[in-house]
Image: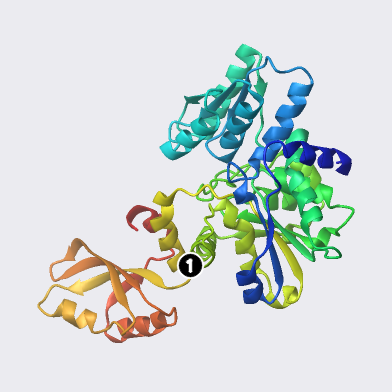
Amino acid sequence: MRTNDVDSAAEALRSLFPATPLQLNEHLSQRYGANIWLKREDLTPVRSYKIRGAFNFFRKVIAAGGTDKVFVCASAGNHAQGFAFVCRHFGVQGVVYMPVTTPQQKIDKTRTFGAGFISIKLVGDFFDQCYQAAREHVERIDGVMVPPFDHEDIIEGQATVAAEIAEQLPDGVVPDLVILPVGGGGLAAGITGYLADTLPKNAFRFAEPAGAPSLRRSIEAGKVVTLPKVDNFVDGAAVARIGDLNFAALRDFSADQVMLMPENAICVTIIDMLNVEGVVLEPAGALAISAIEALDRESIRGRTVVAVVSGGNFDFERLPDVKERAMRHAGLKKYYILRLAQRPGALRDFLNLLGPEDDIARFEYLKKSARNFGSILIGIETKDAQNFAQLTANFEAAGLGFEDITENDILASMII
């Protein structure tokens, strides 16, 4: 990657929006005893960095005489919104393929960004079906497929994030650590490529969702690996296969530099940034900040850390689920199946086992498992995670039949 080409792309991008801010975050800096800088890609016009790669791709096709072409993409998220915005900017026609299951909020936002210049087609229940339909449409109309991450012009566009970081850091300040979120790998490939002559390889960390570790598994295998399944909770970064070009750019990094972030830990970051900083982040946008918590604090004390905040397209209908996951990860909420005797006073006896800071958040009679006993699903919240040790001891001392199902993913997905 040539830095001059990236700098030119960054300059061209100024016709679309100003450089996103690089902010020294006092809250995180004080917490970790380090200088934590956040590159706020949640503040682009479409609240994610995806607009950069799309813009760079479009401008090169148009410069080569492609103004009469119809552009096509397949996406249910940030790529679709960036694509739509750029279609309107250049005044070209575009078609966005989305799965039928795409939330209406995302459909409406994409339509708004591309108003008058895009059409939206809902096809298939899953992305693969949607993507195949988009590919077939491109062939029929001799259009231009705009990939989400695996293309040199997309990578070059995402690298403009690094160009801005280099320009925005105070004179003489060089990051000791740069933390990058990874989905398809376009952002990570672009930023590491641009900063290759400035920072050593060990200055980078990559944050992937634990349920979609496509980069980690590929580095471990020494080749691109397609994951058999992924957890789609971090929908902006849940990719089953990292891009081929992006893997080629990242394959020489150590697998240990790829940090796998549990989805529930990411929820803790989302809630923390919302409550303390008033910053709205989607799960993918919280990846890099969440990774800071997983680092050895002594290893970053007094050092300069840059984390890329990759997106802020958060659907607030997801907030109850995010809060639930955050509390469970922090150890402040647990779910139990209890076997209670069906006799007068049994419930009162159980309530006496709770501590002064324990609160029942859910209580549901499930079924009668025997003549004199019944099964109860109960959710308990507390103010200190250590309280659950005493609660468990109380259950055992009372001879109460119980099972902690908090971390049982199958049961959690069905009944929690």
Specify the quadrant that holds the N terminus.
top right
Q: Which residue is drawn at 40% across and 82% down?
A: 387
Q: Is residue 319 above or below residue 115?
A: below
> Which quarter of the figure has residue 180?
bottom right
Query: Quick check: 156 left or right of 379?
Result: right
Residue 228 position, x and y percent, is 57, 43
Where does the image place residue 185, in percent across and percent down from the top left? 70, 45
- Asked if one can make out residue 309 in the rendered structure from this viewpoint, the answer is yes
Q: Name the residue under label 1.
A: 329
Q: Which residue is drawn at 32% across and 83% down?
A: 396
Q: In which quarter of the image is residue 114?
A: top right
Q: Where is residue 364 in the image (x, y as percent from the top left)?
A: 23, 63
Give the side of residue 237 with respect to residue 107, left or right.
right
Q: Which amino acid does label 1 sit on?
A: His
Residue located farthest toward the right when viewing the structure as drawn: 197
For mark 1, does the 10 Å Cα neighbourhood hold few (<14), some (14 to 19), or many (20 or more) residues? many
- Image quarter where the C terminus lies is bottom left
Q: Is residue 215 above or below residue 399?
A: above
292 versus 392 height, above or below:
above
**Residue that lies at the very extreme toward the left in this rendered image:** 344
Does residue 198 appear left or right of residue 410 in this picture?
Answer: right
Compared to 183, does 276 lie above or below? below
Q: Position of residue 153 (x, y in %)?
A: 76, 34
Residue at 60%, 57% (x, y): give it.
Answer: 287
